[in-house]
Amino acid sequence: ALRECEMISHKEVENNSKLANSTVIVFSWSRVLDQNLALADHIISSKPKKIIFISSVTALLKQANAWNYPRSKILLERYYQSQFTNTSIIRVGFYEGSHDFSKLVGHIPKTSRDELRASISDLVDQSFSRKTLNCWHYEHIPFQKRHLIFVTFYKKLFKFSKILARSYDLFIRMMGGKMYGYTLFTITDLNINNDT
């Protein structure tokens, strides 16, 4: 099924006639929301058969609006589905090869290459689909006492001042840590019983 899909870069979209009547899988991502919306408009205006937008587990966080990445993912999910009827969403967890899992604890939503490929194939094979698929499995790595102390401190700081928490994020990143920001909330606060 994936052989029927066209692979093109962000720069090729605007003048690419191959998108008409094709299944378009949107992996491309920019830190600038307007660039993502412009890409969406170009894809939609080319009149594809179907759009599959690759989103993120972070779009499910109740705190998502505090960060650009999950907030943009939510907005793009809504935009594609409101502007193009035959749009499906695949939300991925922490993708294999893109995270240092040795530095994470908690309920970690992991997505393997095979899981993503199977989810895409499932949607490509359906002539019409307006689904949202959560594409991950959980790996639970227990918290140690020091992790619990840190998480409690971080959440109190975040509740008190998001600006201070973001400054603390920079410090943690400089020290090589991975548990901060939306990553920390994803592995501690995401309600696994309410994933849609």
Image (cartoon, rainbow, N blue to C red):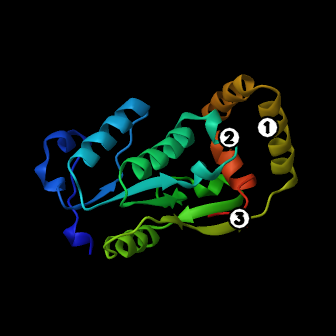
What distance separates the C-alpha of mark 3 from that of mark 1?
21 Å
Q: Residue at x 58, y 49 (%)?
A: 59
Q: Is residue 117 left or right of residue 96?
A: left
Q: If the image is split into quadrants, where does the N terminus sit? A: bottom left
Q: Disc 2 marks which amino acid?
A: Tyr
The residue positioned 21% from the left and 61% from the top of the image is: 22
Residue at image position (37%, 37%) is: 37
* Residue 34, above or below 78: above
Residue 158, image x, y percentages: 77, 33
Residue at image position (32%, 76%) is: 125
Please provide percent x and percent y for residue 128.
35, 70
Label 1 residue SS:
helix
| Label 1 sits on residue | 154
Residues at marks 2 and 3, CA–CA distance in whole angstroms = 19 Å
Residue type at the position of mark 3: Ile
Residue tagged by mark 2?
A: 180
User: Is the C-beta separation of discs 1 and 2 under 8 Å?
Assistant: yes
Name the spot of residue 56 as percent of width and height, x first. Answer: 52, 53
Question: What secondary structure is found at the residue carrying circle 2?
Answer: loop
Give whichever of discs 1 and 2 has the lower sequence position: 1
Q: Earlier in the sequence, mark 3 or mark 1?
A: 1
Given residues 52 and 58, the one toward you in this image is 52
184 horizontally vs 71: left or right: right
- Whether residue 32 can be seen here: no
Tell me the residue that label 3 is attached to: 192
Relative vertical location of residue 10 with respect to residue 159 in this rendering, above or below: below
Task: For the C terminus, give its image quadrant.
Answer: bottom right
Q: Tell me the CA gap for discs 1 and 2.
A: 8 Å
Type of residue at label 1? Tyr
Q: Earlier in the sequence, mark 2 or mark 3?
A: 2
